[in-house]
Image: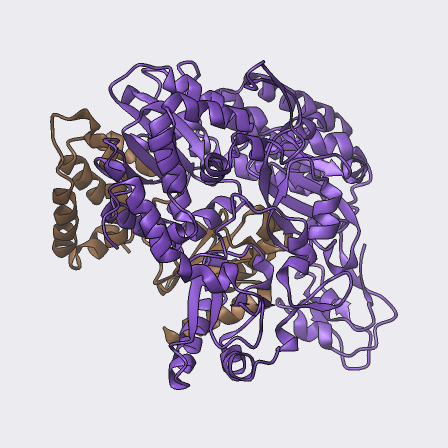
Chain colours: A brown, B purple
Amino acid sequence: MCCCKQLSEGAAAKFNELDAFIDTLGIDRDDERRRGRLIQVLHKAQDIFGYLPREVQQHVAKKLYLHEAQVSGVVSFYNYFTTEPKGKYCIDICLGTACYVKGSEKVLSEIERVLGVKADTHPTEDGLFSISGLRCVGACGLAPVMMVNGKVYGKVTPAKAVEIVKEYKAQG
Amino acid sequence: MNKINSKEALIAAYNDCKAQLYLRNGAAHDINSAKKEILCCGGTGCHASNSQELMSRMTELIKKNGLENDVKVVQTGCFGFCAQGPIVKIMPDNVFYVQVTPDDADEIIEKHVIGKQLIERLLFVEPLLKERVQDYAKMSFYAKQERIALRNCGLLDPEDISEYIANEGYQALAKCLFDMTPAAVVQEVLNSGLCGRGGAGFPTGLKWKIAAGVTADEKYIVCNADEGDPGAFMDRSIMEGDPNSIIEAMAIGAYAIGAQRGLVYIRAEYPLAVSRLEIAIKEARELGLLGDNIMGTGFSFDIEIKLGAGAFVCGEETALIHSMEGQRGEPTTKPPFPANIGGGYWGCSTNVNNVETYASIPEIIRKGAAWYSKIGNWQPELDENGNFVRTISGNAGTKVFALAGQINNVGLVEVPMGTTLREIIYEIGGGISDGREFKAVQTGGPSGGCITAENLDTPIDYFNLSKIGSMMGSGGMIVLSDKDCMPAMAKFYLDFTKDESCGKCTPCRIGTRRMLEMLEKICDGKGTEEMLDELENLAKTITDTALCGLGQTAPNPILSTLRYFKDEYIAHVRDKRCPSGTCRKLFKLKINESCIGCTKCKRNCPVGAISGEIKQLHVIDQEKCIKCGACIDGCPKKAIVME
């Protein structure tokens, strides 16, 4: 699916929402410190759009009076920002040390196998799921941990993880 | 509550609030008390195990039974005993329930609260004694702990500043503003022996002294809450459980060094911590404890939150500052140090400390440096006025460790410096899980190293840990047993540092990748003995040449596993064998003659690799097998073996 197409659905409203947020920040073209707002604005943009395609990055650059390259450099540097759209359900598998020694790699490879997509690539064909490896959510007492759209599931096994995925699949 | 505009107003607010904590702090322990408070953990870990549903269910039942005047449910910060969550502590009964589910709510209200009877099955079972205990102070997990940085976690409602004030909160700030000069505050922190808890262990007082010595109109004080070490979660816990102590400590630091603005750089992966901190900042502003003219003293200070975006290297202070300025989080060489003009936030003098360091400061100011410096194994040299000159050995105070891995009691533990690893693992940690054998403990995360059984009795402090080839780091402590493979652990950490290398300097950008490739070959059985020498050489070169702490310490997991577990590496490269059975390419799963044909393995196999009829010997198709081990876990006859 082309990302521009996806963006066009309600894109104007989304850009308006983003602009309304940026307007509250009082960006001053002549203040070199306006740049300090960039990461905050990108967080908001990713909240709104789900990801940060080039169009959005260009827009942010214009609103903050920055070069597109500066914005793109920041987006590509930080793991939290993504330029790929995500599935309806984002599955995050914690690959922190505590989860790793408790077997999170097996959970990840089982989910990759069942859904037929690799972590940190593209969503499943039906657009329902995308998988990411994550470094520690700080819930090490529950290792291994997986999250679906931010909901934390603790002490998962490969089999339990597949069950959880099936439940979401049934919901569609 | 009215605005607090003087020292007297703070004391008055304290006197008004302190009764709020009576059941938790002052009342005699008594299960027959009609008035009760049910403290329930509201940390990330317990939220994940449904503690919110449990709380609302209990609140509902309290209302239904008309008990709302006597019994109250309080959401507190983390108790630290995360593996046993959700945790419920009932006061003044002093009863500690573990692994409580929303389904247990009825029994807690009906049997315990109304019936005044203990619910045995919800009590914690001591892993070594196999006995149930009700008093948390008698649990081995808590008995040896000394909670200073974590003092309010699990005690106070983090979303209510009046509880913090009721527990003598903001009195340390008042003491500084009304009774101490900035220089006296710096001296007090210096004399306490407190060192940076983020990992490097630089004396906090010295850092403040340097920052205070810079003359500038604009200075910043920063809280480094970018807890990137995977497996460490004390900073998250403190921010979620006691955000006000961070605010108070930052204000104290700002007064001491002469800063007007504070910034908290926090990971976006910690949404709950961010929201608790936002609430606390808002409440503090409303009471006049942040903002202009704090407590009527003319001192003004405010705090802003800056979100990170997922980069381990941003824990390094120069990278952190660049990230706050909206740039890529790449480190720069020091000097200039952040405290120097030109080195900090927008070129201004900036002081950066870690969350746990800040959390200890209000207690140090309130109880005095002399009190804090006697905790731990610190031996300082003092001048004739009793002021700090240098450290002879050891460190002062306590350190929080995040205990995880193959251990019974996973959680956060705070112990005095000088405690031995044996005490932490076998007494507080309750020993190795599944009755397995201890192999090593990894401290310091991806920058640290492993410590083996022969060093279990080393008293833990910054110096001793680096002497034995590891480091304190932020306090992650991953316990490994005989089922963990050391080359695979090193590979795991290198995969992490390779991903997290910012790419600025060549030794780290390319070097970590080359080291990872060698480790992958070793774990796949394609390594050679020469490769081990090559790996060690490269590791040492990177240590010497990388730009920042991330690169310089990235080879540590390799160097320390090579030092202590060379035999495992040799087994991988010479015999093509993984002694712990972790490296999948180095073994096959086979079913031997003891198979009774129960078909359980066939049903357990996720890829349908096992064939065989009932009551007949089963066979694994090696082409299909993904070596997940699901068949081994299910086999009643232990007929599935690794070859």
> Is residue A84 visible to the viewer in this orientation of the structure?
no
Toward the right, the furthest residue is B593
Q: Quadrant of the N terminus of chain A?
A: bottom left
Q: x%, y% of residue B418?
A: 69, 35
Rendered view: A71 above or below B551: below
Q: x%, y% of residue A51?
A: 29, 50
Q: Residue at x 59, y 21 (%)?
A: B543
Q: Quadrant of the C terminus of chain A?
A: bottom left
- Specify the quadrant of the image occupied by residue B171: top left
> Is residue B609 visible to the viewer in this orientation of the structure?
yes
Q: Residue at x 44, y 52 (%)?
A: B241
Camera-side residue: B397 or B272?
A: B397
Rendered view: B426 above or below B226: below
Q: Judge from the rendering whether residue A22 lies leftward or rightward of residue A167; answer left or right.
A: left
Camera-side residue: B121 or A39?
A: B121
Figure disc tally: 0
Q: Residue at x 57, y 34 (%)?
A: B372
Q: x%, y% of residue A36?
A: 25, 32
Q: x%, y% of residue B196?
A: 51, 30
Q: Residue at x 72, y 76 (%)?
A: B600
